[in-house]
Amino acid sequence: MSNRTLRLVLGDQLSINHSWFKEPTPYVDYVLMEVHSEASYVPHHIQKIVAFFCAMREFASSLEKLGFSVRYIKLNDPSNRQSLAANIESLVSAHGYSRFEYQQPDEYRVSLELETISKKVSCKTAAVPSEHFLTSPEFFRSVFEGHKRYVMELFYRKVRERYNLLMDGDKPLGGRWNFDAENRKKLPANHTPPRPIEFARNVSDIVEMLHTEAIRSIGTLDSSRFTWPVTREESLQTLDYFCAELLPLFGTYQDAMHSEHRFLYHSKLSFALNTHLISPLEVINAAIHAFEHSKGAISLAQIEGFVRQIAGWREFMRGIYWTHMPDFKKLNFFRNTRRLPGYFWTGQTKMNCLKQAITQSLEEGYAHHIQRLMVTGNFALLAGINPDEIDEWYLGIYIDAIEWVQLPNTRGMSQFADGGIVGTKPYCSSAQYINKMSNYCSSCFYNYKEKFGDRGCPFNTLYWDFLMRNKELLERNPRIGMGYQLLAKMPEKDKKSIAQKASEVLDNIEDL
Ligand code: FAD
Ligand code: DLZ
Ligand code: SF4
């Protein structure tokens, strides 16, 4: 046996600032591998697979340039055994490594796989922290010790205090922790947000390889012009662009939706963050620096809204995931069983909001938070779709979808399939909310003001039917009491008509 060490770098562990990469160490080899098992655990968006492979290849080549010894296994390499575990086993036995090390994965499934292979290989093994996140699952659990339920706001305040983010001594800057109420504006007519930042990379070789290797994928891409940031430099440019051009109105329009403007004031940083190309602390610090030097052009409400997404929601979701896996993945509070309609894979529906959000997702691998929550997620919840199918869709379609963050957002926040672990109430609404926050309803086949008739908006009928169907489970939830108060006043015959229309809508769900 040699005295060499093999270190695994996963596709979402591309941090050059990890202590592994302080300087090249003799007798240490790093391995990155493109494998069928990771490219196929759900049908991924073609742009997601391309983004991961590009980012991994770029990272390997920058390590090599810095003098590190790197093994890079391409998907079509004849020696590739096409799973992380099988390749590690082969490498250890073929090269006689005396030690195998990996960074603790973000995802439960991969963590189990690496624990299993570590027991199997004939050498010493060690898992080290990935050094990416602001908080650990232990910190998350300590915040909520003795509490009946998780509340994001409490956790977020602890993170702000711990890292001294937007603080004035031991008080929040501006005297308030949360400026959410100022952040809910519709995009005004004739308002054009800055152009989204784009890169232009030719990825034809990867696309061709995926085709030859028969990797199933969804969505589209222009292989001569791949636009997402996949290197650290591109990620930093995306961050700079965000701070200079988008942050001044980020909070104001973060909930707005518009058919002509797909990215609005959103940062497009989620892929770079989730692959560790860039760290949450450097993103937050850069944004706070821009705020402090903006001479008032960036208000506290904008920066607070942004910091909350990363220091609050992102870390909170991770804490939920690692505290509740593997059970979380099986939760189905409403016992929903309906299949996801075909138009989730094509965008071909008369419901304009869904058409816009799905078409955009298929073309970009991206939809922003409110499109995911209040359009696709809301519809799936109201229609009673099986959460397994919904998870598979979200995990596949978005460029930033990795299970630790996708699952608590989808099954938890959006579908309430966890019965209230993530959120206090289901995020459901009728057409009223979609019309308030978007321009979708004005050119829709359906009428957002109507429940009945051929043109009645399906969201309206399904919203009331959802409340009636799930009365037993939801009636006592104080946060949705309002809906039930209105239902209590509704004449029985109206309720009957709604139930009848909703059952027609659901029977014909593929034709909406
Ligand atoms: P911005 O709007 O610019 O926000 C800045 C950053 O804040 C994001 O890059 C992200 O890192 C973080 N952030 C914001 N909201 C959340 C949140 N709820 N949870 C975690 N981080 C957040 N995000 C993912 O990264 N991967 C997913 O698979 C994912 N699935 C989602 C599924 C549903 C149903 C919902 C409602 C949200 C999901 N999100 C997911 C959160 C959010 O939609 C994306 O992080 C965001 O749209 C990414 O775009 P952006 O970088 O332009 O974000
Ligand atoms: C998403 C993805 C894809 C498509 N392909 C690979 C791959 O071939 N090799 C790899 O190491 N990682 C890949 N990833 C990311 C992983 O699926 C997974 O999300 C993380 O490695 C675990 O947190
Ligand atoms: Fe969506 Fe209904 Fe508005 Fe059409 S009318 S865009 S289906 S909410």
Image (cartoon, rainbow, N blue to C red):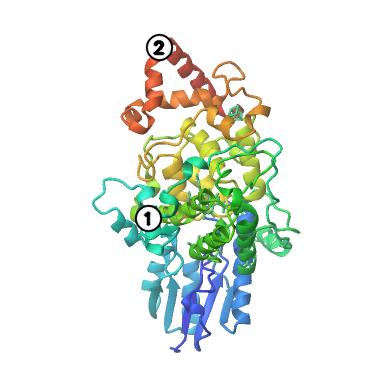
Could you say where residue 24 lies in the image, as x and y percent from the top left? 53, 85
- The structure residue drawn at horizontal position 51% and vertical position 51%, both measured from the top left corner, is 300
Q: Earlier in the sequence, mark 2 or mark 1?
A: 1
Residue at x 60% of width, y 37% of height: 186
For disc 1, the neighbor class at 10 Å (few under 14, some 14 to 19, many from 20) is few
* Quarter of the C terminus within the rendering: top right
Pick the front one: 154 or 475:
154
- Give the number of the mark in front: 2 or 1: 1
- Residue at image mark 2: 492
* Image marks 2 and 1: residues in contact by CB distance under 8 Å: no
Taking 236 as reference, is 412 left or right? left
Q: Quadrant of residue 185?
A: top right
Please say if 330 is above or below 224.
above
On the image, the x and y values in percent for residue 127 come to: 39, 73
Total numbered circles: 2
Taking 96 as reference, is 210 left or right? right
Residue 171's tag is 1
Residue 74 seen in this snapshot: no
Q: Residue furthest right?
A: 224
State which quarter of the image contains the N terminus: bottom left
Quarter of image, res 311: bottom left
Q: Residues within 10 Å of mark 2 (few under 14, many from 20)?
A: few
